[in-house]
Amino acid sequence: MARKCAVRLLGGFQVVVNGQPVPAQEWRHRRGADLVKLLALAPQHRLHRDQVMEHLWPELGADPAAANLRKAVHYARRALGVMNAIATGAGMLELWPEGELQVDAEEFERESSRALADESGYELALRLFAGDLLPEDRYAEWTEPHRTRLQQRNLQLLRATGRWEEVLAVDRADEAACRALMHAHLEKGNRHDAIREFQRLREVLRVDLGVAPEASTVALFEQAVATQGAEPASASERAQAVLARGLMQWNERDLVAAQESAEHARALSIEHRLDRELGEASALLGMVAMARGRWPDVFRQDFTQAIELPNEQASFVFEAHLCLAEATLAGGDSRATGKLARGLLDRAVEVHSPQGEALMCQFIGEAEFFAGHLDSSHDWLTRAAGLYVQDSGSGLAFTLLRMAEVAAAGTGRSRPASRLAEAWRIAAQSPLSAHLKVRALEVMVKTAEDSKRREAILAEAEAQMARPKEICRPCSIGLAVAASIACSQAGELARARFWLGHAERLAGMWSGGPWQAAVWEARAALRTAEGDGVQAHALLREAADLFAQSGRPLDEGRCRAAIPQ
């Protein structure tokens, strides 16, 4: 038996036997590498064979899983160079039982536990963390608990040593780190640096609809704004302080106080021509109205007032309502939103507001799409796009994305590729980037022309999902459904389950309706890939019925067409 085996799992997989790295080509058979990784992470590096099969091949029956296990043992032994590298007996498998085995993740956990208990030796432990666990296996379910545990342990060490910038590099939304840096800036008299740190945090948090900093963070920001320095707080800083408190009140579901703060911020913004703050105040008012079931009334009032404002200000008000309107359209109330838009269109034309006219044409076109009226949808969206050309903001991006979906659904009049490229360009620069990017990726997955293109899009989507504070989580449900279905159809079952799990968690935000139906459809695609046609057809019937109840004939028809007659 060879004397020593070192397994590296942090930052990437590598094995060194007696000081000699095992060449990467020796792991060309993935099953052998997966077995070594799994056993390296297991307690005492031992697992029962049934546990190994359940972790690595959960979708397979007993006989094919057992065949895979035999091959995995063979490939692992061959790569490691000795027969006893994987011991088998009494139903158990053990890695490197007769020599010295060193696993970097295990060593990191041991040293970090010692450092945190002794409150010393942090440097050694931090040096041992070479990166996230097995980044190449991020979608393997059996790695996730270990990866999360190790990430949290690394964050504990960084917090214990006061490395707040490094904490924020790992978790940009860590409010304790933000507050520590704000305190440090204020102690040095750097009021503006403290304000900028808060603004950075708000920018991170605002991508999740309605997420606000904690009360203690807001109080610290208010202290920074109120601090007497060389110059008084600007109108923008005062409006931001009011908005931050309003969002905090929204999170606490104090709707009365949140509305009062939003109205105060809105008045400040109009008085001082603060376009961005005006948009955020409108968004907060819209969220309060949505919670009270009064969003159409508030939107009608905001829209009527906004079309009388200068274009720069009006665009921020319109963008503030875009995501709320899109959520209403996609959430099953497209007919009511279309009716509202038709009622407001004439007013926008009357006051010569191309922006307002474009927005109403967009909403009508989207409502027509969901109703299955593709020709009408194409015409309305084309009119919106023509008006938006004068103002290529987020509204144009949403319109182009929907036009690509209309084209894919069968009109053949649009050029999805060129429209998607333009929508992606706008999304990268838009204040609504966090919402638009996931929508764009969703449509790209649905309309990809070949498997190579779809794989590139999925890789980009996964990179975006790895930065959760830069995307809107609720908006990502459509991407998760589309990606799960695409992965199921490609036979990538572990990847499909990852995306499906994400969609299922988000679907809990809605009771019934089209998003629940979409998740049923994604489940059906996975069952089909697993070979369970009976269950898949039952799930498709559930999805079709829900789509029908939600007024989605195109989606209903697609699901029914997939059920054998």
Image (spheres, rainbow, N blue to C red):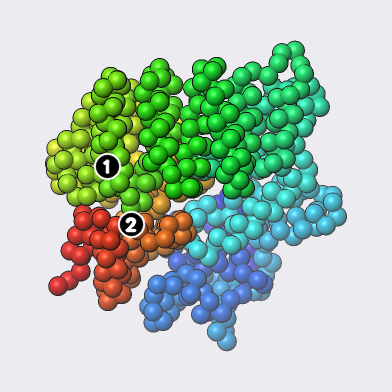
Q: How far apart are marks 2 and 1 (CA)?
A: 19 Å
At 65% from the left and 56% from the top, the residue drawn is 150
Residue ranking furthest to the top: 230
Q: Quadrant of residue 239?
A: top right
Q: Which of 229 and 73 is in front in this view?
A: 229
Q: Is residue 342 above or below residue 63?
A: above
Which residue in the structure is indicated by mark 1? 339
Q: Quadrant of residue 242?
A: top right
Q: Nearer the viewer, residue 329 or 102?
A: 329
Q: In which quarter of the image is residue 355?
A: top left
Q: In this view, does 107 lie above or below 179?
A: below
**Percent coordinates x, y for residue 276 in the rendering:** 50, 25
Which residue in the structure is indicated by mark 2? 514
Instruction: State which mark lies toward you, 2 or 1.
Output: 1
Looking at the picture, which amino acid does disc 1 mark? Lys
**Percent coordinates x, y for residue 350 in the rendering:** 26, 22
Q: Which of marks 2 and 1 is nearer the N terminus?
A: 1
Looking at the picture, which amino acid does disc 2 mark? Pro
At 20% from the left and 69% from the top, the residue drawn is 563
Q: Nearer the viewer, residue 172 or 257?
A: 257
Q: Do the residues labelled 2 and 1 touch (CB within 8 Å)?
A: no
**Percent coordinates x, y for residue 395 in the rendering:** 34, 32
At 32% from the left and 27% from the top, the residue drawn is 356
